[in-house]
Amino acid sequence: MPPVLSSLHILHPRLSLYVKPLFLRKFPLPRRSLPINPRTLSSVASAQSPTENGDSRGRSGSLSAPPPLLEEAVQKIDVNPPKGTRDFPPEEMRLRNWLFHNFREVSGLYGFEEVDFPVLESEALFIRKAGEEIKDQLYCFEDRGNRRVALRPELTPSLARLVIQKGKSVPLPLKWFAVGQCWRYERMTRGRRREHYQWNMDIIGVPEVTAEAELISSIVTFFKRIGVTASDVGFKVSSRKEVLRCYSISENLFGKVCIIIDKIEKIPMDEIKKDLKSVGMSEEAVEDLLRVLSIKSLTKLEEILGGPGEAVADLKQLFSLAEKFGYSEWIQFDASVVRGLAYYTGIVFEGFDREGKLRAICGGGRYDRLLSTFGGDDIPACGFGFGDAVIVELLKEKGILPELSLQVENIVCALDGDLQGAAATVATILRDKGQSVDLVLENKPLKWVFKRAARINAQRLILVGNTEWQKGMVGVKILSSGEQYEVKLNELE
Amino acid sequence: MPPVLSSLHILHPRLSLYVKPLFLRKFPLPRRSLPINPRTLSSVASAQSPTENGDSRGRSGSLSAPPPLLEEAVQKIDVNPPKGTRDFPPEEMRLRNWLFHNFREVSGLYGFEEVDFPVLESEALFIRKAGEEIKDQLYCFEDRGNRRVALRPELTPSLARLVIQKGKSVPLPLKWFAVGQCWRYERMTRGRRREHYQWNMDIIGVPEVTAEAELISSIVTFFKRIGVTASDVGFKVSSRKEVLRCYSISENLFGKVCIIIDKIEKIPMDEIKKDLKSVGMSEEAVEDLLRVLSIKSLTKLEEILGGPGEAVADLKQLFSLAEKFGYSEWIQFDASVVRGLAYYTGIVFEGFDREGKLRAICGGGRYDRLLSTFGGDDIPACGFGFGDAVIVELLKEKGILPELSLQVENIVCALDGDLQGAAATVATILRDKGQSVDLVLENKPLKWVFKRAARINAQRLILVGNTEWQKGMVGVKILSSGEQYEVKLNELE
């Protein structure tokens, strides 16, 4: 450790500024300009914009003329992102990165490999005939080559497409995850947006319920990592197998009925009944179905179904595995859960907040028959989608949103304009050693530098002053302790 | 370290499989099914697809009926991503992640904060009047609310929009970076695609050339990190200031002329001349201009310009700073570099491969007047874009593409179907300790498990067998050394 210099402020006149910052306002230092490029912010601020300088259009340029203008009429643009979309300024981006980092870390712990697909897909990939909302919410258009394309509303169809494409060249099971942006043109209510990012994990090639159990385990691990507990959230689990099928629902209605039932908590029961009848169910069948859907006990379901069918067996195994994985307290049977996508064929699950304030946090299930709808051979598969919106609302609700701030290790500042190059050398030395550096690119008063150092949470301020530089040294100030010392350039770590 | 068990294969009959794998083919073990869920892959593979089972449509479901089909006619989809777009299967995704990781690490070293904007923006943001190619290459359409929108072809206009929106609430300078997908409907030639990811770094609020110097320094740092040297690539640097303006180019032609000149290495000189004349330049002015553009020496430029103007002063300062940053050997003056975007106003630069085989690797420059074209107050700014395509071609060319493979620390396998839950417990213990685990989800022969272990580069195989489990232990095999031992569950690290 180099010797601490308690009198560092004597070495250079500007250094004294930060020990008595109050003087700054009374006696501001004159602005020095750089020797080569004398432009200053104020000269730029006063430069005329094209509107103020309309008569200049069409004039020939010459060496003495003002800098060239973009030949644009000024169009006052809307500074907001398109309706339903988001900008990610630094503070929002840090939150997004933190969330995605946790998605990726958990997926890695489970041995999943990351994949991605185009945001823009062929429209045909998303058009299914089960009356899903998704169809009317597609961001679709015709491209310049007259192809019908759509911004993906979900990731699973693209995954299925890639699995078919890869065919037998990839050994099963595949354990894939993705974090991708999805688009739905939804009515804008209660903070709903038209794009969101979705974390997907999928297991392709495993018919056993162990796959569903593994997927739910990974979500539980994610919740735990970000501070969400079993008293905050839970999973409702059911199976589409017998729960729906045993009550006189014809197979070509199956998808449509699932989609109607998925809205059971969102729209009035009368409307649900009306919708079910409108697709062709009898009054009696609707009543039967709704009775089954209200069941919250597996034993009760078994009773009503008149014995242990496949659905009950699957669910029993899932609950048994949940115990072994250690997340029993997180899951419960709820026959009303069917999920809103047509392609699920077996177990379905969704994550919910126990206070019941929010939409589903995540959802998924088994979709053993999706590939054949695209013309491929079926392979057993299951997966889930976990959006980036509801979870953030939950974290806010619980007051456990992480505080994420910018942190740059060093701020490097030249004390004279003609030492700007020297400061660049110092920054390069530090960066070569893996240290992050905010290099002050202009000649700024030290008060400004300290303010910036505080804003970026810098640990050290490196000052490049003439006297020290001539000795091959720089001044270092540890910002947390106020400790100051000089250090030789080649000893700077 | 627990004692090494050299005779582990005696403990369980299936363990002997991996010491004599050749026997497997002659005497395959019978497939055991799980007690609860008797489905197997083969039963799934033989399930009929909807086309093969057309008569089932419309039939009522019952407990004994086959599982419900998705009610879809089979549509044979194109398994390829839309023309000009990419899938990212795991091996491609690892490369993308490696690249993005380096983008982010370097940006962090320079103290830049990450931001992002919507992929879908208002079309107006990208329509400029300078005749840029970009206008004809927009993926644009009308959304369901009759708004003209476009997939972003570049990130800078969105950044400008956000800067105007933030207004005085953010302290300058801003140092922002982004890694985002951009779309251009280009003719598909020489491996050109219609989407690519672009790394952008921008400095907003610094009029000094130190900003450009800092940006080029960050790209050099990136190149060095990924193994690209100054003998592989370089930067051509120029300034739009006098280089173009002093040769009788009227200001309303400025943007158009820049865009024509940007193609100087891509299309024949005769066509360049024709294009320049067609926008209104005289024969003489064209010849003058092309003479200036051929200059590769700053001294020569100064001579021709008849003294040190702003452009020469800027460039001299840049070369002086390059020395201090330590990247002199990477940059050279080349008057023909103007870049293809209308909004640049000062120094422009582009990264090129010295063998001249590839398109520009990256490019950027100063755009001090962009904000006013959107109706905002101008703030001095500069930035660059660095695509994910050409750099990968370069790495391939040089044979220095990194080898990135999946690596999962543990593979956990139950030796009996009824130990699947026990294996889940073991996987949970390891994951809770931060160890990545590929859990074998089905009852598979050990030969299969070893093959999978090799594919995922597992370091350890954890075997959960009955005898050991009853003692609260599991078998561990270190796959690199072949070392085997038993360990108590609570001592498993």
Image: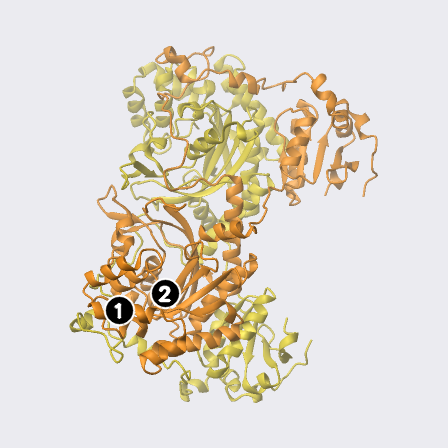
Chain colours: A orange, B yellow
* Residue A251 shows in the view: no
The image quadrant where one finds the C terminus of chain B is bottom right
* Mark closest to the chain's N terminus, 2 or 1: 1
Amino acid found under the numbered disc labelled 2: Val
Q: Secondary structure at mark 1?
A: helix
Q: Are marks 2 and 1 on the same chain?
A: yes
**Which residue is situated farthest in the front direction here?**
A270
Q: In the rendered view, does B408 fall on the left or right side of A200? A: right
Q: Name the residue beneath numbered marker 1.
A: A287
Q: Chain of mark 1?
A: A
Q: How many marks?
A: 2
Callout 2 environment at 10 Å: few (<14), some (14 to 19), or many (20+)? Answer: many
**B221 and B440: which is toward the camera:** B440
3D distance between C-alphas at marks 2 and 1: 17 Å
Residue B483, quarter of the rendered image: bottom right
Which numbered mark, 2 or 1, is in the foreground of this view? 1
Q: Position of residue B122 (x, y in %)?
A: 34, 35
Disc sitting over residue B128 in the figure: none
Residue at the spot 71% in from the left edge and 34% down from the top edge: A462
Which part of the image, by quadrant, shows the N terminus of chain B? bottom right
Q: Mark 1 is on which residue type? A: Glu
Dot 1, crowdedness within 10 Å: few (<14), some or many (≥20)?
some
Q: Which residue is mark 2?
A: A337
Which quadrant would residue A235 be assigned to in this image?
bottom left
> Where is B480 relative to A224, above or below?
below
